[in-house]
Amino acid sequence: MVRRLAKAIREASGNGAEAKLKRAQLRHRLLTQLPDRLSGGKLSRAYRAMEVEVREWTVAAPGWPTAFDGLRIGQVTDLHAGELITPEHAAGIVARLRGRGVDMVVCTGDVTDLDPDHAVEPLNMLGSLEAPMGSYLVLGNHDALQSAEAVASAARRAGVKVLRNQSISLRRRNATLRVGGVEWAETVSSCAKTVDLAAAEPHGRPDLLLAHNPKAFRRAVQLGVPLTLSGHTHGGQLALRRQEPTFPRRAAWRRLHAGPYVDGGSHLYVSSGAGSWFPMRVNRPPEVVVLTVRKG
Ligand SMILES: [Fe+2]
């Protein structure tokens, strides 16, 4: 047992894609399967029984295009479909956005925990939601562990547009909304490079930026992007108390952890997401988000 563990740890060291996958598989065995098995399956059952909150939030961003004042965006993130959150359960979470009167739906990454096949069911659900301005996905670090391309093509088959360091211009009644999305990047500086790619011509600076890692917000602020949506943090999963912010916190000097932030005219919402790999959440309930974006 000790020898097998030592071998797995050796294989998981390094920076290549193979080592990253091995590390994720090791983490899955130690931090997902082991605690759950020690609890006799209680942890995962309790996790799946948690009520998913539909969190409504209104953002007032001065740079938001007037023609899209009042736009409603449904956001899901960090479903981590797999062993803990089954693909079917993840699809049920996405379905919580149904009937909410959203204009567009977005997923800010980590649809799957490890296996791209597990992303298919929740992505099919995402693509089936009624959203006149479409459904969009940016990939998270977990989506890229085995094959980012496999997750991206499952999304495309479901009718979900994947934004990979690029922007698109959406037209509605002679007005344009630019939506940008970036690939997974780890540091503030590597995130900045992806944001610059998404903000390049011909579309230019996006009005709405989707980025799995909230660190992308640092560059979004410099470029004057009115609204960024992120995930990745799971809100820390374990918190001493429940936090229900009534106004956005100033992003400067803060760790971008969970909820709404503002810096100058740029807003960020970091969703705590709905799934995870560690089978426990305390004071950070799973959530899907409905944002109403106002110009103001
Ligand atoms: Fe995640």
Image (cartoon, rainbow, N blue to C red):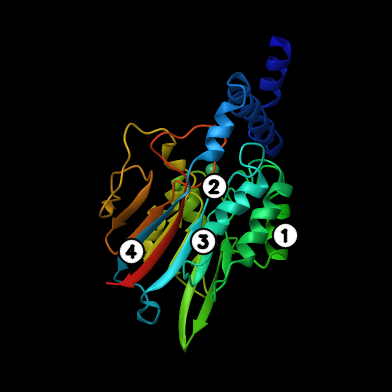
- The label number, if any, that marks residue 153 in the structure image: 1
Q: Secondary structure at mark 4?
A: strand
Q: Secondary structure at mark 3?
A: helix
The residue located at (58%, 48%) in the rendering is 110
**Does label 2 or label 3 sit earlier along the sequence?**
2
- Name the residue that disc number 3 marks: 97
Q: Is residue 163 left or right of residue 234?
A: right
- Name the residue that disc number 2 marks: 78
> In which image quadrant can residue 120 be found?
bottom right
**As displayed, is residue 266 above or below residue 15?**
below
Tell me the kind of residue under disc 3. Leu
**Does label 1 or label 4 sit earlier along the sequence?**
4
Q: Return the x and y of residue 126 as percentages of the image width and height.
A: 61, 61
Q: Label 1 vs label 2: CA separation? A: 18 Å
Q: Label 1 vs label 3: CA separation? A: 23 Å
**As displayed, is residue 278 above or below residue 287?**
above
Q: Secondary structure at mark 2?
A: loop
Give neighbour class at mark 3: few <14, some 14-19, many 20+ (Cα, 10 Å).
Answer: many
- The label number, if any, that marks residue 58 in the structure image: 4
Q: Return the x and y of residue 177 as percentages of the image width and height.
A: 46, 76
Q: Label 2 vs label 3: CA separation? A: 15 Å
Q: Nearer the viewer, mark 2 or mark 3?
A: 3
Tell me the kind of residue under disc 1. Ser
